[in-house]
Amino acid sequence: MELKKTFQWALVVPSSMGIRLTPIAQGQPVHKSDRLLMQATSAETNVASVSAYLGFPVKVLTTFVKGSPIAQFIKDNLSSRHLTYEGKEVEQGGPWGYRHQINIADSGFSLRGPRVWNDRSGEVGRTLNVNDFDLDRLFGQEGVQILHLSGLIGALSSETSRFCLELARAARRYGTKITFDLNYRASFWKGREQELRDIFTEIASVSDILVGNEEDFQLCLGMEGPEAGGKALAAKIDSFKGMICNVKKAFPDASVFATTLREVVSANHHLWGAIMLEGDQWHVVEPRPVNVIDRIGGGDGFVGGLLYGILKGWEPERWIQFGWATGVLATTFLTDYGQPADEDQIWSIWGGNARVLR
């Protein structure tokens, strides 16, 4: 996959930033915890962090509540992750006005599964507006190798839907590669099904890389595919391949299609794999057992590693291997994003080498 040669940004992601609250006592449920850890979070910056920690220039397009200490906390966190940000400062509008989203989560333990409570009332990210950004400067003057879009932002509000659509159109005009992680959420789509189907279909039609599980491709784009759950993942790989072939026929301009494969044995023991079609070549990582501290962010870590491999210009087989391993890395952190020390750490995960490095 040939990428733009002159650029300021390797990766650009639009995102709605918020905070994540998790019990300090790892594995304990929220309702029995009196001390919580606060983190800055978003699915899109989970993806972006892989490239940023490993040295690529990455920009986050977002929006902030003006004067908010939570906004300052988020900005400081993004900077600590080597992520540059650009975004409008929105007046709070009083105590019942705008705020940053709150994600309250526990990681589960053994056969008690994780529980996540999203509190997004008044979310400032829903105001993300294409008129607040100079797309010609971003894509034309500065230059972007890959624009990463998430269906979470695409479905957040009518404004953010148009924002993502216009970003995709501008990226296409300037020759920037586009990756689209569909990320279907039923609660976001309620009452807007046809509107969002049309928008997601147009974005997918100009995308170079499409990512999603069976539910994402079926409910966002109307593709036929395997039912969620049911038989073991290893037995479903042919069904996944059939689904991706259907997607490729519908969206022939895309050259890479990928999805993760996860079977949950318990909250802390998963079988983790991945499948990717690049051109006409299949690449499959058969599900392998992994131990999990917190599963949230594993899929984002996979996408982040996949994009890093593309940005590095590696052979496609290495994209999915690196993505598989960065997905594993994310599940070993208390944050919902992985923080790789270097490439060697990721390749050691891929190789199954957990020996002490002195």
Image (spheres, grey):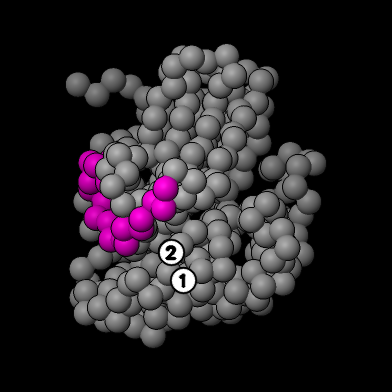
Measured along the vertical axis of the image, is residue 329 above or below residue 13? above
Measured along the vertical axis of the image, is residue 109 above or below residue 67? above
Is residue 187 rendered to the left or right of residue 67? right
How far apart marks 2 and 1 lie (CA) works out to 7 Å
Q: Where is residue 238 shown, x and y percent of the image?
A: 71, 55
Identified at 47% across, 26% down, the residue is 22
Residue type, numbered disc 2: Leu
- Do labels 2 and 1 touch, CB within 8 Å? yes
Within-10-Å neighbours for mark 1: few <14, some 14–19, many 20+: many
Residue type, numbered disc 1: Phe
Is residue 195 rendered to the left or right of residue 143? right
Secondary structure state at the residue bearing disc 1: helix
Decide whether residue 335 is among the magenta residues. Answer: no
Q: Quadrant of the C terminus?
A: top left
Q: Where is residue 28 shown, x and y percent of the image?
A: 54, 16
| Magenta extent | 74-94
Q: Where is residue 140 shown, x and y percent of the image?
A: 27, 81
Kindly tell me whether residue 228 is visible in this rendering. Answer: yes
Secondary structure state at the residue bearing disc 2: loop
Q: Quadrant of the N terminus?
A: bottom left
Tell me where residue 115 sits by quadrant.
top right
Decide whether residue 78 is among the magenta residues. Answer: yes
Residue to which mark 2 is pinned: 128
Q: Earlier in the sequence, mark 2 or mark 1?
A: 2
Residue to which mark 1 is pinned: 163
Identified at 78% across, 51% down, the residue is 227
Identified at 55% across, 40% down, the residue is 119
**Residue that extends furthest to the bottom in the rendered view of this protein:** 173
Q: Where is residue 174 shown, x and y percent of the image?
A: 34, 83
Identified at 30% across, 39% down, the residue is 69
